[in-house]
Image (cartoon, rainbow, N blue to C red):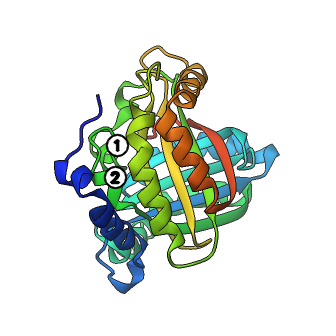
């Protein structure tokens, strides 16, 4: 059963969750030491994707000089194929990001790696997110930092997938807090849905801070432990459709959104999140 890290988070849910949601909306640039998450997407030339992947795997230890949480490639969905998708969690914020990226850029090995992969990339994109405050309220939601500290690549069987579920919300200051408040109220119904595959796990909820604003991502992992990720995801989806509170809540959440899409990602062998 789902456990809450704070009983008060449920019993006085409306006021507390609203406060947490508003905190999740604050811009990280106003406080350079506030935790941030960076989502980077590199679109690769199809003919050069294999070269990029090979060089990136060989240099993966260098990349882990940064607080890498996830690295993978789309199998299907809204993100274009042959796109390298990576997530970094900077607990000390924008200053940490600036300092650590600058230090890595000075390394001769990194310069050599970049020299071998730059021609493979057609486009690069970076966006900054914050983890929603509700991530701290649910024991079953690990957050990204957990995976940096507990590197799943050390014992991966290659069967897992990561699912990105993207909500593009309507414009307005209240839209994201209202979304997160509704989401937190009905999330227990989905996490506890009868029939959910045991490997399915909500990793984090990300709220955009720099980039396309009023964007929310759910990050889920499915499979592993000798279980097929796609099969685990489909089993859990079927289970959630039978969760009455979740279905009712999603109907309300849908009124706040302009679009919703998903992408299935296959973690690279060195990705901490597997």
Residue 64 numbered tag = none
- Residue 205: x and y in percent read 44, 53
Q: Are marks 1 and 2 in contact (CB under 8 Å)?
A: yes
Under tag 1, what secondary structure?
loop
Q: Determine the CA span between mark 1 and mark 2.
A: 6 Å
- Mark 1 lies on residue: 141
> Is residue 208 shown above or below 83?
below
Q: Residues within 10 Å of mark 1 (few under 14, many from 20)?
A: many
In the picture shown, does residue 32 fall above or below 244? Answer: below
Quadrant assignment for the N terminus: top left
Q: Tell me which corner region of the image, top left, top right, bottom left or bottom right, holds residue 127.
A: bottom right
Residue furthest right in the image: 47
Q: Quadrant of residue 41?
A: bottom right
Residue 118, percent across and down?
67, 60
Task: Tell me, yes or no, if residue 61 can be seen here.
Answer: no
Compare residues 224 and 262 and report the one nearer the observer.
262
């Amino acid at each position: 059963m789902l456990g809450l890290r704070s009983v008060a988070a449920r019993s006085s849910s409306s006021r507390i969750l609203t406060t947490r949601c508003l905190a999740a909306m604050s811009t990280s640039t106003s406080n350079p030491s506030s935790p941030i998450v960076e989502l980077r997407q590199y679109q690769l030339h199809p003919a050069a994707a294999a070269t990029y992947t090979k060089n990136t795997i060989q240099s993966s230890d260098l990349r882990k000089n940064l607080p890498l949480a996830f690295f993978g490639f789309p199998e299907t969905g809204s993100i274009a194929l042959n796109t390298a998708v990576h997530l970094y969690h900077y607990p000390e914020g924008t200053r940490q990001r600036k300092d650590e990226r600058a230090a890595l850029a000075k390394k001769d090995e990194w310069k050599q790696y970049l020299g071998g992969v730059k021609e493979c990339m057609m486009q690069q994109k970076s966006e900054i997110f914050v983890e929603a405050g509700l991530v701290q309220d649910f024991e079953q939601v690990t957050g990204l930092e957990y995976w940096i500290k507990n590197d799943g690549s050390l014992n991966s069987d290659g069967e897992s997938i990561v699912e990105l579920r993207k909500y593009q919300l309507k414009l307005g200051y209240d839209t994201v807090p209202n979304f997160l408040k509704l989401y937190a109220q009905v999330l227990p119904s989905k996490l506890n849905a009868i029939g959910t595959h045991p490997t399915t796990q909500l990793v984090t909820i990300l709220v955009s801070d720099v980039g396309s604003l009023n964007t929310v991502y759910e990050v889920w992992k499915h499979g592993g432990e000798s279980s097929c990720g796609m099969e685990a995801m489909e089993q859990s989806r079927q289970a959630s459709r039978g969760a009455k509170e979740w279905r009712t809540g999603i109907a309300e959440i849908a009124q706040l959104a302009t679009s919703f899409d998903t992408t299935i990602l296959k973690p690279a062998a060195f990705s901490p999140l597997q």
